[in-house]
Image: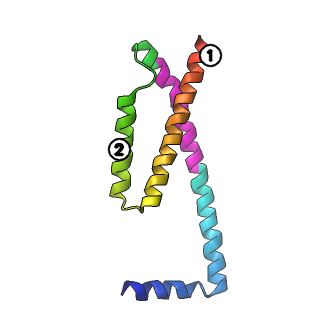
Amino acid sequence: MEQQSLNNNEKKFEDLKYAKKVLQDSRHEIDIIDEELINLITKRTSLAKDIVLSKIALNMDIHDETRENLIYEKIIKIVNEKNLNENTKNSIVEIMNILMNLSKTEQKEIIDKND
């Protein structure tokens, strides 16, 4: 039954007008999502200053391996709950690693400016 539904759905794309409309709408939606992602990354990164100043006030190490491990555990739990394929799961973990490194870099720059 699922194969039948997939075939029917694929047949819709044989109509070029339909295919062009779906392409245009999908690209527009991706543009909106890209802007939202950039806004969220900017917001996440801007928290680095608050985090590093709090760590300094609390006399904590800048590198918090326990916190990083908790974040990775949370990420893995979320991606597993979403039933994503392995490639997508691995890519999301890579993206989160990039974001965490960005945050650490921002924190280091703030410390270096205040030295």
Mark 1 or mark 2, earlier in chain: 2
Is 83 displayed left or right of 7 in the figure?
left
Which residue is the site of mark 1?
A: 113
Location of residue 83 with respect to 98 vertically, above or below: below
Q: Could you tell me residue 22's position as x and y percent?
A: 60, 74
Label 2 sits on a secondary structure element that is helix
Q: Which residue is located at x 62 percent, y 82 percent?
A: 18
Residue at mark 1 to residue at mark 2: CA–CA distance:
32 Å
Location of residue 52 with respect to 1 vertically, above or below: above
Taken as a whole, is the magenta stretch helix, strand or loop? helix
Is 84 displayed left or right of 110 in the figure?
left
According to the image, what is the colour scheme of the structure?
rainbow
Location of residue 41 with respect to 29 vertically, above or below: above
Q: Could you tell me residue 110's position as x and y percent?
A: 58, 20
| Mark drawn on residue 104 | none
Q: Could you tell me residue 66's position as x and y percent?
A: 35, 30
Name the quadrant of the C terminus.
top right
Look at the image and say whether residue 49 sits in the magenta stretch.
Answer: yes
Q: Which residue is located at x 54 percent, y 37 percent?
A: 43
Which residue is the site of mark 2?
A: 74
Q: Compare residues 37 and 98 and report the one nearer the observer.
A: 98
* Amino acid type indicated by mark 2: Lys
Look at the image and say whether residue 99 sits in the magenta stretch.
Answer: no
Q: Which residue is located at x 56 percent, y 29 percent?
A: 105
User: Which quadrant holds residue 32?
Assistant: bottom right
What crowding class fits label 2: few (fewer than 14 Cα within 10 Å), some (14-19), or many (20 or more)?
A: few
* Amino acid type indicated by mark 1: Lys
Label 1 sits on a secondary structure element that is helix
Location of residue 62 with respect to 23 vertically, above or below: above
Q: Compare residues 26 and 55 and report the one nearer the observer.
A: 55
Magenta segment: 36-53
